[in-house]
Amino acid sequence: MESQESQDAPDGTDVHRAFICASFNQDTTSLSVGTKTGYRLFSVTAVDKLDCIHEGHVIRIQGLSLVPLPVECPDVYIVERLFSSSLVVVVSLSMPRRMNVYHFKKGTEICNYSYSNNILSVRLNRQRLVVCLEESVYIHNIKDMKLLKTLLNTPSNPTGLCALSVNHSNSYLAYPGSATIGEITVYDANNLSTLTLIQAHDSPLAALTFNGSGTKLASASEKGTVIRVFSVPEGQRLFEFRRGMKRYVSISSLSFSADTQFLCASSNTETVHIFKLEQHSPSQDEESPTWSAYMGKMFTAASTYLPSQVSDMMHQDRAFATVRLNMFGLKNISALATIQKLPRLLVASSDGCLYIYNVDPQDGGECVLIQKHRLFDSSEEQVEEKTEENPEDVAPQPVSQSYAATVALPSTPPSSTTLMGYSEEGGAEKGEVIPEHEFAEGPVCLDDENEFPPFSNQSN
């Protein structure tokens, strides 16, 4: 099928100036986009149309002045939606140390928290909400937003790299265990205890993601050449994939398919790789005595006599399928989803577009672009151009970028005074800087008819 573009989309291909970040929700049914005027939530359950579910923004007067609304805020560089519920977490460049939790259908704020440093990433499932700063991690109970645990003095993590299992029955949390090597700390956010340390890579980590059940964890290092998959909580290496050999790249996102058969990886290059998670048993090779199977046996036998680095390379699987993007060097995130009963690859790019590709689950190969959606219209670009001419009206941006499922632009943070609060044990700790917060008036219950999920009915 030939690629199509939304009928109302402009022909221009310039990077959209309003675009700041993008993230998919936990089951890849929704896309959240942060902009200079607020944020947008889109439904991605159909190929031919991209419905805007909600738009939170500030009012612009003559394209120049900003009039903030009491709930929403501009310059959103983190926006995360909880599944298909009305709960959305927003962090603005104007207040990078403050997290706002909204019920967007009611247009109300559930609560907000302020932290001692800039918020770099936020992860959430039906049981926990995790906030990652450069040298600390905060774990909240999502039912009432109470702070349960503060992990202080974690290894320096300037990109806010972390991953939270979407399976709330285990709520595994993964984050760097070292700033110099690719060590992963796996933490049980339900029982508030460390599970294991995984020595994943020789270089510092660049990307992490869990599969849907939280039983597998994929990782990539700053070199970006090798992607590994480990069992959780055991930490045993299950798969090793080679993305490339000649050049180092920056992996921007990793994502499993819902059935954990595939893993996709996007980077700052023009190629998105899709790997297939399948174990090659000896019986399969005997049943299909092909030339490739014969050569595979020969390489396996020869690898025992070669240096370890060469031997490891010969055991690494290559990409099952690939996508060639019509762009290079632009930030993007990718995710695998089942849309209209077929496997698709979704790529949200900082050029302001969402690209949808068909994936052949049997033969793989080059994926076919079937739809391109513009996330903004041309009139909004014109408003942004006017704002660019008046830089004093544009809020400064933070230095660090939020990781992976969020694509953020480079920025400079505003300074703010240190905020003192209370520890998870309920009392002030001398010398410890922890969040100042405003609790929700009661349990967080998204009680819209047919709302998903109903928080009050959740179990540990």
Image: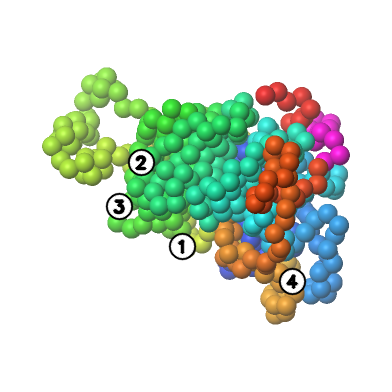
> Which residue lies under the disc numbered 2?
241
Amino acid, disc 4: Val
Q: Earlier in the sequence, mark 4 or mark 1?
A: 1
Amino acid, disc 1: Phe
Q: Residue at x 40, y 52 (%)?
A: 180
Give the SS element for disc 4. helix
Query: 10 Å neighbourhood of mark 2: few (<14), some, or many (≥20)?
Result: many
Q: Main secondary structure of the magenta part?
A: loop
Screen quadrant of the C terminus: top right
> Which residue lies under the disc numbered 4?
383
> Which residue lies under the disc numbered 3?
245
How far, Cα to Cα, is label 1 from label 2?
A: 22 Å
How far, Cα to Cα, is label 4 from label 1?
A: 26 Å
Side (left or right) of 250 relative to 296 = right
Q: Which of marks 4 and 2 is in front?
A: 2
Nearest to the observer: residue 149 or residue 322 = 149
Proximity of marks 1 and 2: CB atoms separated by less than 8 Å: no
Q: Residue at x 69, y 53 (%)?
A: 115
Proximity of marks 2 and 3: CB atoms separated by less than 8 Å: no
Spot occupied by residue 437 in the image (x, y as percentages of width and height):
77, 48
Amino acid, disc 3: Met
Side (left or right) of 222 relative to 116 = left
Q: Which residue is drawn at 77% across and 53% down?
A: 55
Spot occupied by residue 241 in the image (x, y as percentages of width and height):
36, 41
> Which residue lies under the disc numbered 1?
328
Give the SS element for disc 1. loop
Residues in magenta, as a range: 440-452
